[in-house]
Amino acid sequence: MSAISLEKLTKVFSTGVRALDGLDLEVNDGEFVVLVGPSGCGKTTALRMVAGLETITEGTVRFGDRVVNDVSPRQRDVAMVFQNYALYPHLSVAENIGFALTNKKIPKAERDQRVRSAAATLGLSGLLNRKPAHLSGGQRQRVAMGRAIVREPSVFLMDEPLSNLDAKLRVQMRSEVLRIHNAIGAATLYVTHDQVEAMTMGDRVAVLYGGVLQQYATPRELYECPANLFVASFIGSPEMNLYEASVADGELVLGSQRLALGGTETVVASYRGRKVIAGVRPEDLELDTAGQAETAGRAGQATLATDVLIVEPLGSETHVFFAIDAPAVGASTLAAAAGETEAGMLAGPAHNGVARCDPRSAVHPGQRVTFRVRPERLHFFDPDTNAAIR
Amino acid sequence: MSAPTLAPPAQQPPTEPRSETRRERRRRERLEERDATIPVELYGLKRGTVSVLTACCVLFALFILAPVAWVIINSTKTQANIFQSFGFWFASPFEFFHTFANLFRDVDGDGTYSNWFLNTVLYSVVGGVGATVLAALGGYGFARFEFRGAKLLFGIVIAGLLVPITLVAVPLYLAYAKVHLINSIWGMILPSMVTPVGMYLMRTYVELSIPRELTDAARIDGASELRIFFRIALPLMVPGLMTVLLLSVAGTWNNYILPLIIFSNNTLFPVTVGMSLWSQHAGNSGDNNLYPLIVTGGLVTIIPMIALFALLQRYWRGGLLLGSVAN
């Protein structure tokens, strides 16, 4: 049985804004589920509805088989970690962590023992008498976690708990949060806007956009089989390269270039002679260093010739930015369609594609290169519905 | 005069703060303050303008402080000297302690200053504390809960700000007569516990200084609404509470019209009404030596307010939320 199940969960604010639209979601016992999406996608609203801090316009929230729509937060027995921690500033670390236990009238001896063990789990043992003002950002975050885990809740909610930490600490706390999750084994609903957090932490990830669930799957599935254009461009960094293209004679027409589709042609068979949106992940573009284009062609691989514009060496890999003459479709295009582009994005960069290459490959801007693409690694989307073509 | 210059970057305080004596600390703070002061030129002001404005402020301060100085000086004089000697300087004999002692004796059977003083303390403390508690509860309620009619009710509270007591004096008297609050201490205390300003201040204070996440977190932690109020919100409302407490205590302390309307029994008078009674007596027959008592009594009456202000000042500090929420 699922620990949390949301059924057609909908929130319409009194201003008429539909923040969440018919969200269906199941979280199994002990599962770590991440709600991810850009800001304003309704993920925090959904979480607050599960917590009982927001009224439910339509739909149901169930914990186990109990409908909790009209149950007050204090009776829902959920633990929640807030984005800005929301520590009680006038209480010590021990009192902060033990506050929920005091509310439950748990005897002092047991309370102390549980607070101490939660503090030990989080490495806060030496700080129990401090006030939040005298803690570092990371320590405050731990206290917020401690306040939640000490209750041994059956449902654990986290609202962007790591977003206020600096980059290095955030990566460190990611594994820390997972370690704690594995130790207590409560069903967890974790909200973030960071797709890396979603991919690295979630057993399953729910991608929300515009209040609507786009896809609910394992990170691997999201990455390899995105259900639609939004998921394709949102998940993965750098983003998937997406272009308007058309299908003709077993080939993909991409601007002035033609890519042999080979066996993949059957996927887009019904789109023959029509437009599709074609996508390829940056790591699926293999740099053809020694003019192996001929052999590639024979091995059933397509090739893409282009000029290198920018080279970004990251150490472990190198990002090669290029431009081809097919119109690109990207997250920014999607955002523009939804009317939320950020001030026109300056003067748009001239590149419309990126490849993830071996750091030792000697590529320099201005160079003419060829990328090999395996046709089965191409993703196709319907230009009208944005849904994946499979 | 040397032109002020931009201060060099503030020096780190000397290493061992523990070994620093109080005197050294004060000196360091003074120097740091001087370093932090920005010369007027950097505000785009001319020295001349600043001098003129300063002179205006000094004049205004003199205007405000002169009566206070007069009271202090004349509390040391005999009745004859109050009228005959120069008002802004001392005259012998020095009668302050004599008058002060007399102040607390029964003067003419009309009730005594000490009686009135205790009445004032009673009305102000009970009324002021009550007003603060009610303002805190009401302000928090208006700030944190959404309920039907909240806007209308708050509008009524705000409207209460605009009604002067003199306007409602007659209806108030008639209403009091009906419910037997004439010549009752509750007639004085109950209205003193109503403070629209206080409620307005508390609502604003709660909205601005208690993050919603904090009360949300407490709710999730299973605290009842009352417990959230007392254990989480109230400690963070202290600076606001102190403001309301001071305003309402001072308001009741200085209230003249209300007790004048509702009390006819001298033993219930607060100092304000009692002293005006003395004033009348002194005016009717000039030889009863009441003027020194009135002047000294006035002085003694303002001392507790000054003390209260000094005492509460340390609660007006920022940083109560430090470490609570990250931004």
Image: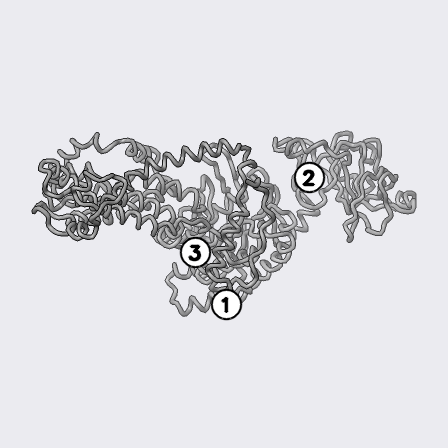
Residue drawn at x 67%, y 43% as measured from the top left: A226
Q: Which residue is mark 3?
A: A90
Q: Which mark is residue A117?
A: 1
Which mark lies nearer to you, 1 or 3?
A: 3
Location of residue A207 by image quarter: top right
**Amino acid beneath label 2:** Ala
Which residue position holds label 2? A388
Question: Which residue extends farthest left?
Answer: B109
Marks 3 and 2 sit apart, C-alpha to C-alpha, by: 53 Å
Q: Nearer the viewer, residue B136 or B10?
A: B10
Contact (Cβ within 8 Å) of mark 1 with mark 3 = no
Quarter where residue A108 is shown: bottom left
Disc 1 and disc 3: Cα gap in Å? 22 Å
Viewer can see residue A315: yes
Residue at 59 percent across and 62 percent down: it is A179
Cα separation between marks 1 and 2:
49 Å
Q: Position of residue B247 (x, y in %)?
A: 31, 43
Q: Give the side of residue B79 with respect to residue A356, left or right.
A: left
Q: Closer to the observer: label 3 or label 2?
A: 3
Residue situated in front as seen by the camera: A67 or A100: A100
> Considering the numbered disc 1 on the image, is that residue within a helix, a strand or a loop?
helix
Judging from the image, mark 1 belongs to the subunit labelled A
Tell me the amino acid under the disc marked 1: Ser
A130 left or right of B178 in image: right
